[in-house]
Amino acid sequence: MNSLGKHALVTGITGQDGAYLSDFLLKKGYEVFGTYRRISTPNFWRLQYLGVFDKVNLVSADLVDAGSMVEAVKLAEPDEIYHLAAQSFVGASFEQPISTGEVTGLGVTRILEAIRKVAFSSNHAFDRCSWRSRIVYAFEKEMKFYFFFLSLFSSFAGKYSSTM
């Protein structure tokens, strides 16, 4: 157990933001758990570069797999969750918009559902009220994306709806 006794769960720990955040949290005394996507070629070079690869607890999880998110929350028993995982390739997001929405949009819902399932289960005691403030970051990040997307879609739809 670390000196603070705080656990943090970082989704997208292998990305630039996730790797630097994990380094920061470790220096603050947190025990860090990080989710990474199950792919054939692991991508841990940022964590290795920062010298934190052996200090974080890696959890294989996928934002499109609700069960794996529940298991990640159960395993980490986090005091804080930092949701940084998303579709990582801009080009792919345009080529595969439905898949991008599944990962980036519904991924937040799966994380929140995992928190709800774990926090309200009889085996885990979380301070349910404190979760509200801790998940605000995920909502703020995703809502900015949604508002941007909706404004683009609205202007696009408005521009072309009169020609249909």
Image (tube, rainbow, N blue to C red):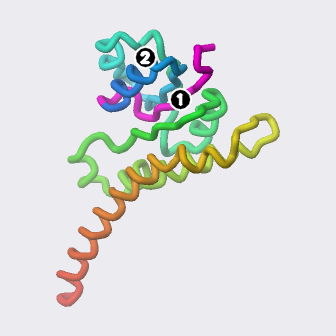
Identity, as a three-letter code, of the amino acid under mark 1: Ala
Q: Residue at x 54, y 35 (%)?
A: 80
Q: Quadrant of the C terminus?
A: bottom left
Residue 131 on image: x %, y %: 61, 45
The kind of secondary structure element at disc 2 is: helix
Q: Which mark is residue 27?
A: 2
Q: Is residue 136 above or below residue 155?
A: above
Q: Is residue 51 above or below residue 46?
A: above
Mark found first going from the N terminus, 2 or 1: 1
Residue 35 on image: x %, y %: 48, 30
Q: Residue at x 52, y 37 (%)?
A: 81
Which residue does the numbered mark 1 point to in the structure image? 8
Q: Main secondary structure of the magenta part?
A: loop
Neighbor class of circle 2 (other Cα within 10 Å; few <14, some 14-19, many 20+) is: few
Residue 11 on image: x %, y %: 46, 35
Magenta stretch in the rendered image: 1-16
On screen, residue 102 versus residue 109, left or right, reads left
